[in-house]
Amino acid sequence: MRAILWMSGAIFSFCLMAISARELDGLIDKFELLAIRSMVGLVLLVIIMNVIKRPRLMFTQRTKTHVWRNLFHFVGQFSWLVGIGILPLAEVFAIEFTVPLWVLIIAAIFLGERITGRKLAAVALGLLGVAIIVKPGVEILDSGAIIMLIAALCFAFTFIFNKSLLRTEHPLTVVFYMTLIQLPLGALMAGADWTMPEPWMWPWVMAVALTGLAAHYCISKSMQLADVSVVISLDFLRLPIIAIIGVLMYGEPFDVAVIAGGALMLVANLINHWHPKKDLDADIKTML
């Protein structure tokens, strides 16, 4: 039950972040938004580390890995924000669910990980899900879908670097360096014509700044309480939820193909994460 409550918090956070980004689309520079998000996160993390009396978490011996992780994550975050303004919200979330698929492929190509029959089946189902969602035979690939696929690919590289970092780094250190590195990146890309958000925008800006941290914390807590397969299944619920939100708030069409493609990717992810019990606990510890 506690795992369900934590995942409910993650789903709420992801949906609120998407709505906030949509409300700000075209009204604030996306690089500026990313810089403000990093600035708010950096201040919050410094406070947290001092409150818990662990300021040493601000130091690392793996600066190069942090830099590579955040270069990919920054591009992924920017692409995600662009995709939010172009695509229906449900399609954004559905394509984002391809991240585990790209992790499998990247790990096989660059890390030499062996592709088993189970992983191959997961990749095949995942690719079929992508094809159903983006409908390449109908409109080739529209720019929004391409941008979101770039975001998903960048998030996959981020996941791999994250997995490596968490073998030696505390999660707060990883998030701290995310904000520390991405703050100057966002400020630099925003350029000299920086304009502060209008007062009515700030609730949406703060929502974007805080919901990402909240969502990933909630997922981590949920993974401590339940199997990965349970967490993946619960996370899938944000796809139909955001689809309904898109219909009610923005008049977006309810595309059954998006839900069907997402469901196939859910099955693919469940196949990929199926392990005997003795291996599952080790996988969870590695992911956290």
Image (cartoon, rainbow, N blue to C red):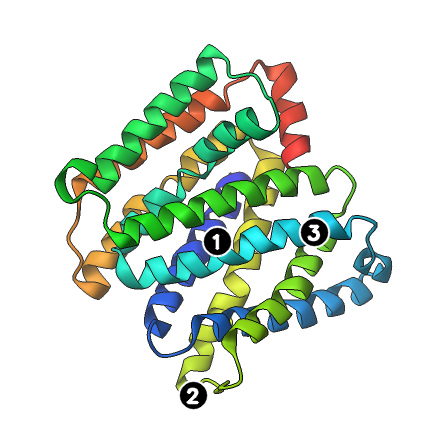
Residue at 46% x, 43% y is 153
Residue at 50% x, 47% y is 154
Q: Position of residue 162 (x, y in %)?
A: 64, 43
On screen, residue 179 above or below 114: below
In the displayed structure image, the side of residue 200 where residue 245 appears, left or right: left
Q: Position of residue 254 (x, y in %)?
A: 17, 49
Residue 66: give its label. Answer: 3
On screen, residue 261 above or below 177: above
Q: Position of residue 212 (x, y in %)?
A: 52, 58
* Residue nearest the viewer, comparing 226 with 59: 59
First in sequence: mark 2 vs mark 1: 1
* Residue nearest the viewer, comparing 112 with 281: 112
In the displayed structure image, the side of residue 151 where residue 136 appears, left or right: left
Residue at 16% x, 62% y is 251
Image quarter where the C terminus lies is top right
Q: Amino acid at mark 1?
A: Gly
Residue 137: give its label. Answer: none
Badge 3 local density, few (<14 within 10 Å), some, or many (20+)? many
Q: Are marks 3 and 1 in contact (CB under 8 Å)?
A: no
Badge 1 local density, few (<14 within 10 Å), some, or many (20+)? many
Disc 2 marks which residue? 198
Cα separation between marks 2 and 1 = 26 Å
Give the quadrant of residue 71. bottom right
Cα separation between marks 3 and 1 = 15 Å
Q: Are marks 2 and 1 in contact (CB under 8 Å)?
A: no
Disc 1 marks which residue? 76
First in sequence: mark 3 vs mark 1: 3
Q: Position of residue 81 (x, y in %)?
A: 40, 62
Q: Amino acid at mark 2?
A: Glu
Q: Amino acid at mark 3?
A: His
